[in-house]
Image (cartoon, rainbow, N blue to C red):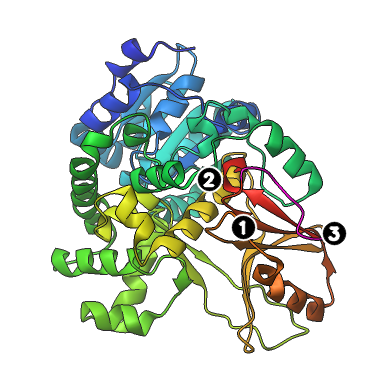
Amino acid sequence: MLDFFSYSCNLESESELYEARSEMLERTLKNVIESVSQSFPVLILTGPRQVGKTTLLASCASKNRSYVTLDDLEERALAKNDPALFLQMHKTPLIIDEVQYAKELFSYIKIHVDKHQNPGDFWLTGSQKFHLMKGITESLAGRVAIIDMLGLSAKEMSGKAQASIPFLPTNEWISDARENQSLLSQIDIIFEKIWLGSFPKLATGGREQREIFYKSYVQTYLERDVKSILSIGDELSFYKFLRATAARTGQLLNYSELARDVDIDQKTAKSWLSILKTSGLVYLLEPYYNNITKRIIKTPKLYFLDTGLCAFLTGWDSPKTLEAGAMSGAIFETYVFGEILKSYWHNGKDPLVYFYRDSDQREIDFVFESNGTLFPVEVKKTATPSLTATKSFSALHTLKKTIGMGAVICMREKDVPLSREITTIPIGYL
């Protein structure tokens, strides 16, 4: 493995310097990176800033792989103005950090790839997926593997990165999770993790730095990412929009309410939300829709992808006040969704997951689809869930689909069946 202290001397930005020198927890994606690099000449690792993209690639890199970041303005200028010379100066195998700042590189990377046909030549990172995807579709289609990354998962924090497998409430998944439980299902432990969030700098012991970290993170996000995507003249209004969005995590998306709260029009609200989505800060969960029924509400649900940032933006100053506050249930559900999403993305997969809500107000938090079978899942911040929590599961029978095992993710210490078809899953299993 590459020595991180020697490697860090090549990193230009202070944030990446800290990240490379901080305690390195193994990431589930490591095996995916190594496997994909044997088949694809270009790998793009996308995700929000500060989730550990560079550190992960460094941990997978051989000593002959060089590194350059386009956060460095001189390197960025060279990449944009003379991409051919840039690639002559930086030999492959190569890591290019924040590659979205110089989309001019993509055509020249394509030329190099078509000429040399070497798997793993280019490892690219980016925190603005919109710009990345535009460049890929124009230049690198068929030559690139795209991998999404979020902050540390509970499994990664507990040192069980390779025990993480994509969530599905089957007996096989539950049996494996029981043997590899990531943490105890205790309310104070869970809400400490929710409040801190999953950015490596905080999750590995930076509780005292939480407020300054998130203040700096938001300011950097506004200055670097938002301004480069859209010309937003009123940063204060966008910050208010960011906070209003965080306050609605786990809720149905309502553009008119968002726009009204921030005093902007709906068109602007949609544009700004697309920025949050492409920056990897929010996820829009679509409703399950089957052509057999026309009664499903088609509005998506909104989830913030880091609960620590969400809690900071909504003003909760301790895990205890967050757990006792009005957002407690919504942010608990948000945390569960984030861990489930990481279990897929960090294994290089995309989940087929939806929510269900019909015009009769029957709701199911998550519906997973696998091989034509639907798996309903509810999330409850309780240690003693009852079958009444799953009363809406029967609504899925109207969809004329095979219904698999149902589950309630909750605060129990051990999994316990509620019926022959439904079981409880401790949140510590995620």
Please tell me which residue is depicted at 34% across the width and 72% down the height of the picture. 271
Rendered residue at 18%/50% (across/down) = 219
The residue beneath circle 2 is 140
- Label 3: few (<14), some or many (≥20) within 10 Å? few
Q: How far apart are marks 3 and 1 (CA)?
A: 17 Å
Q: Mark 1: which amino acid?
A: Thr
Q: Give the extent of the magenta segment.
A: 413-420
Residue density around tag 2, few if under 14, some if 14–19, many if 20 or more, within 10 Å: many
Kind of residue at badge 3: Arg
Compute the Cα span from label 1 to label 2: 51 Å
Looking at the rendered structure, the kind of residue marked 2 is Leu
**Is 229 placed left or right of 55 in the picture?**
left
Q: How far apart are marks 3 and 2 (CA)?
A: 49 Å
Question: Circle 3 sits in a helix, a strand or a loop, which is it?
Answer: loop
Residue nearest the viewer, comparing 132 with 223: 223
Q: Which residue corresponds to mark 3?
A: 420
Whether the magenta-drawn stretch holds residue 414 is answered as: yes
Name of the residue lying farthest toward the front:
384
Between disc 3 and disc 2, the foreground one is 3
Position above or below: 408 against 172:
below
Residue at position x 61%, y 32% in the image: 32
- The verdict on residue 294 being magenta is no
Q: Name the spot of residue 284 as percent of width and height, x first.
A: 49, 66
- Residue 332 locus on image (x, y percent): 47, 57
For residue 164, say whether it is visible. yes
- Of residues 260 and 49, the one nearer the viewer is 260
Q: Which dot marks residue 359?
A: none
**In the image, residue 167 lies at what x, y percent?**
67, 48
Dominant SS of magenta comes to loop
